[in-house]
Amino acid sequence: METDNVVGTIATGGRPRGLVVGQGGKSLYISDESTNSLLVVDLEQRKVAERVKMQESPEGVGISPKGDWVIVASEVSNSINFVSPATHKIVFNVTTKGKNPEHAHFSPDGKWVYVSAEDADKVDIVDVEQRRQVNAITVGMRPRGIGFLPDGSRAYVAAEIAGTVYAIDTKTQQVIARIPSGNFSNGVTVHPDGNTVYVSNGKDGTVSVIDVAENKVTTRIPVGKRPWNMAITPDGKKLYVANGRSGSVSVIDTAAKQVIKEITVGELPWGVVIQ
């Protein structure tokens, strides 16, 4: 993070997609769509330690605030797999009503999981305690990335074909704002201070900066080709953007709102996590 240089690679094989860092920062969980598996990577040894069988076509991966659940969105199975980090086994599955769940994110309090159902144009809401879906919110065509404000009061969902970001009041579970973002809006990341939301626009090759108070885009930052998912540093100073068609990661200075470095990585990077 200090030099923003590649210091190593981890061979996974297959088609790695979603990824999260486990509690304590010792493990990395990666979905492998080609083998319907969740890869458990030992970060100290930088190698795959275990492959856990998932349902069909695992994509997005999330982790609960307390670190007691790792969740995997299995697209073809229309389900969310809840995996115990202690045993690396599926404890239960929640079938979602929407088609092709891509991303699944816990609310900051860990009570809810919001799921983007990309072929249903909805956000499915799962009650974690009840272990079932309890609501579905209609948004624009092909919802993708989801991000919560730190206080959990709102969720922001990017709809790719609609080119729009939907702000959802989590208390009422209603859409309260529709924010035009750019062509092929997909990844969503929230600044730790809760004042700014970042959205990648795949076709434009930009990242939109949304002012939360006004719920509007204040600027668009040019990045690489087909930007996808992103991650922000805990201090909020740098935003890392995976550029799928450039084989790179753009590093954005969030204060200056400009790219300060382009890091060459492997082919078709899909996401970024920060340890």
Image: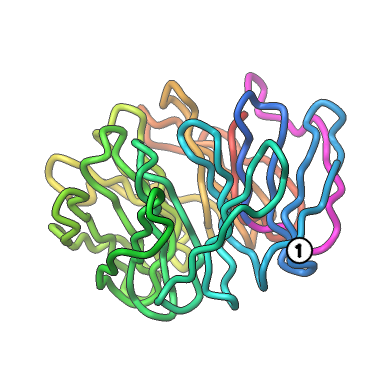
Q: Residue sitting at 83 percent across and 42 percent down?
A: 10
Q: Is residue 221 above or below residue 118?
A: above
Secondary structure beneath dot 1 equals: loop
Horizontal placement of 186 versus 273: left or right?
left
Task: Report x, y in % for residue 68.
Answer: 55, 36
Q: Residue sitting at 50 percent across and 75 percent down?
A: 100
Task: Report x, y in % for residue 231.
Answer: 51, 40
Say if the magenta span includes residue 252: no
Q: Quadrant of the C terminus?
A: top right
Horizontal placement of 218 versus 65: left or right?
left
Q: Which residue bears the numbered disc 1?
A: 15
Kindly identify the amino acid type of the residue bearing the numbered disc 1.
Arg
In this view, the residue in front, 77 or 58, is: 77
Q: Is residue 209 above or below residue 67?
A: below
Q: Residue sitting at 36 percent across and 29 percent down?
A: 192
In this view, the residue in front, 149 or 216, is: 149
In this view, the residue in front, 160 or 76, is: 76
Say if the magenta span includes residue 12: yes
Magenta segment's dominant SS is loop
**Region in magenta:** 1-17
Q: Quadrant of residue 38?
A: bottom right
